[in-house]
Image: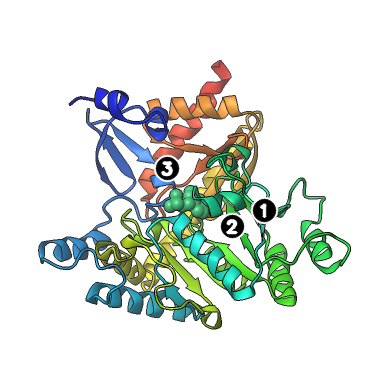
Amino acid sequence: MNGDAFTAHESNVRRYCRAFPTVFTKALGATIWDETGKPFIDFLVGSGALNYGHNNPDIMAPAIEYLVGENILLSLDMHTAAKRDFIEGFVDWILKPRGLSYKIQFPGPTGTNANEAALALARKCTGRSSVMAFTNAFHGMSLGSLAVSGSASTREQGGVARHDVIRVPYDGYPSQAFDSVSYIDCILSDPGSGIEKPAAIILEIIQAEGGMNAASTAWLTEIQRICRTHGIVFIVDDIQAGAGRTGDFFSFESAKIEPDIVCLSKSLSGSGSPLSIVLIRPDLDIWKPGEHSGTFRGNNFAFVTAGAMCKMWSDRKFTAGVERTALRLQTHLDRLVAKFPRYIEQKRGRGLMAGLKCRSPALVGRVHDVAFENGLLIESSGPNRDVIKVLPPITITDAELDRGITILDHALQEQDNA
Ligand SMILES: Cc1ncc(COP(=O)(O)O)c(C=O)c1O
């Protein structure tokens, strides 16, 4: 079958293949090749699922050894040596050095599986049904996650009512002048507000699909305080912003907060293989055995690659390299903002989770097309898709990063002739 197999047989729902119309065959690090041999710098990275690049040798070497050794691949939630190694690595290299203590739940393998589990647990713990969620949030495509997502087109999916959600303004919404955290505090404290106390507040530290909006430390600290004051479970959806994307392992580290529940997925396996976990404050782990389930909770290939990823965080050279790359990216973006004020309104995000808010969605569409033509995969985000989402692998080489930025610069420059 040739390329027409997709048009002839794949559902109309397909999306990224329309934005990047070629057939990809090979990938290494931050470079992905199509079947004509054309290389592209990858600033899309599986929408944040390939933070460590494609086929990272430090991650793939143990996985290849594991695959040829007739080892367990699927294990439901039975004990396996690979799962034990992952748990030990995650605790020793990720949780302990950050002074964190969580129980680890393995839900189904996708991000939305983790969020559904977190929401169900918060409801079980509190006996309350509603959840407070934010403008421009995105939490996934299953019904519970859709309900707490903000985008109208996303929420319309599923065709059933989505109850029990209290929508509140995120930090900076609708403008920096609005003090959303005081508003939230007020409606939760005032018996006349008409707002019932929710089971949980769920949020992203940086809203990715929502337009790369980064919450401030002061705002997050206040949200945590409000949760503690009112006995509300504080859930951080770190599915896209976590696993190293901001330059720290967790996106909330710099804010020095400690959420009650943290959801991780996407880049957690380090390899693109599906894996999710829900980190639960130990006293909230009131699940009964088997009460929450899922067939693909035991992806042992992903346990092996995730273990290798965790180990990388114990290497000071690795973490220093990520910090340096984040700084290099930010410098590049500051330069683009200064060079193209006619096209770019502001820089958004933090670390290696960055965005450029542009003056129109049409412009972003054109920049995307020129960039693709010249060998760069880049995505847009935001409710109006007017934010260029810049998501290079956190392990990208300086040469690849510079090349990607040069292509982006050129695509912006081209708009003078559009
Ligand atoms: C913040 C956030 N939460 C949840 C999800 C859903 O993850 P998945 O597509 O694996 O279900 C996404 C996906 O983009 C996301 O960005």
Residue at 44 percent of width and 46 percent of height? 47
Residue type for callout 3: Leu
Q: Which residue is mark 1?
A: 134
Pointer 2 with pointer 1, Cβ within 8 A: yes
| Secondary element at image label 3 | loop
- Residue 177, above or below 366: below
Which numbered disc flags the more N-terminal residue, 2 or 1?
1
Q: Is residue 242 visible?
A: no
Front in this rendered view, residue 412 or 168: 168
Residue type for callout 2: Glu
Residue 162 — which label? none
Q: Which residue is mark 3?
A: 44
Front in this rendered view, residue 70 or 405: 70
Q: From the viewer's perspective, is 356 left or right of 310?
A: right
Mark 2 or 1: in front is 1
Which numbered disc flags the more N-terminal residue, 3 or 1?
3
Residue 204 — which label? 2
Which numbered disc flags the more N-terminal residue, 3 or 2?
3
The percent position of residue 406, horizontal first and vertical second, equals: 45, 35
Task: State how far apart marks 2 and 1 are (Cα).
Answer: 9 Å
Res 258 quadrant in image:
bottom right
The percent position of residue 309, horizontal first and vertical second, equals: 33, 65
Residue type for callout 1: Phe
The percent position of residue 58, horizontal first and vertical second, equals: 26, 62
Pointer 3 with pointer 2, Cβ within 8 A: no
Q: From the viewer's perspective, is 209 left or right of 31?
A: right
